[in-house]
Structure formats: C-alpha cells, structure tokens
Amino acid sequence: MLKRISFAEPIVVWLVPECHDLGVRRIWDVHDGLAALHRYGLERLRGGGRPCREWREAAAALSIARRYPTPNSVAHARRALGDAAAKAGALAVPDSLSMLAAKGFDFAP
C-alpha cells in the first residue's frame, strides 16, 4: 500500500460543479489529488486528448510529489491542483479563511 502524502490543508471541490446541491469533496492528499484529475469536472480540462496547461501542471506536480514528497513539492502540487480546480469551476472553497468558515469557526470578537 502506498503511503498517503497529506496536504497542509485540503482542497475542497464540488462533487458536480454544475449542481452545488450534491455537496463537496475534500481532497486531503497527493493520491486523492491524482484521482481527482479524472473527476469533479477536472476531467473536462483534458478536452479532446490535449489537456490544458493547468491540468498538465497539476498532473506533473502531483506525480513529482508522490515520488519526492518534500514539503515544497507537496505544497506546489496542492497549488497546481487548486489552479486546475479553479479553471474547471470545481473549486468550492478558495482559501484558508473560507475553509475555516466552512468548518463552522466563528470570527466574531
């Protein structure tokens, strides 16, 4: 079994970008990130067998992070996956503060 290489914080994507009522999925690690490139609307970035730049960069960065799991390679892979998710319209929670809000944290003084 492959060792799971976790991101510092998850990337949150819509299960079906066109239908937000179906909910979200949290991508916690490199392995799930590689699988996500073929789901959640991100597969559309592969259009006609010639993937767009964001999809190719995410695939490359995630593959590198899987082979060489340094903090920098994993952070780069997370950023690249987030860029691809944003391009596909699948990114549900774009930043850390939104993530905290989604978890129910109260920012009131």
Image: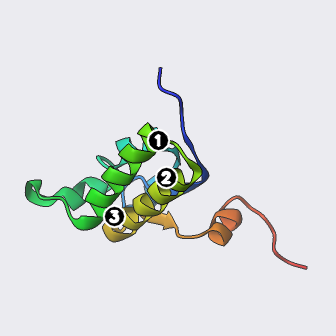
Q: Are the residues tagged 1 and 2 within 8 Å (C-beta)?
A: yes
Asked if 34 appears above or below 83 in the picture, the reply is above
Q: Which residue is mark 3?
A: 18
Question: Pointer 1: residues within 10 angstroms few (<14), some, or many (20+)?
Answer: few
Q: Is residue 17 left or right of residue 109?
A: left
7 vs 38, nearest the viewer: 7
Q: Quadrant of the C terminus?
A: bottom right
Tell me the SS state at disc 1.
loop
Tell me the SS state at disc 3.
loop
Asked if 9 appears above or below 54 in the picture, the reply is above
Residue type pointed to by label 1: Tyr
Q: Label 3 to label 1, Cα distance in Å?
A: 35 Å
Q: Nearer the viewer, mark 3 or mark 1?
A: 1
Q: Which mark is residue 76?
A: none
Q: Are the residues tagged 3 and 1 within 8 Å (C-beta)?
A: no
Q: Which residue is mark 1?
A: 68
Q: Is residue 49 left or right of residue 25?
A: left
Q: Position of residue 93 (x, y in %)?
A: 54, 66
Q: Label 1 to label 2, Cα distance in Å?
A: 7 Å
What colour-coding does the image apply?
Answer: rainbow
| Residue occupying the point 54% across, 39% down | 5
Q: Quadrant of residue 55?
A: bottom left
Asked if 85 appears above or below 3 in the picture, the reply is below
Q: Which residue is mark 2?
A: 73
97 vs 62, nearest the viewer: 62
Q: Is residue 31 left or right of residue 58?
A: right
| Residue occupying the point 45% across, 45% down | 65
Question: Pointer 3: residues within 10 angstroms few (<14), some, or many (20+)?
Answer: few
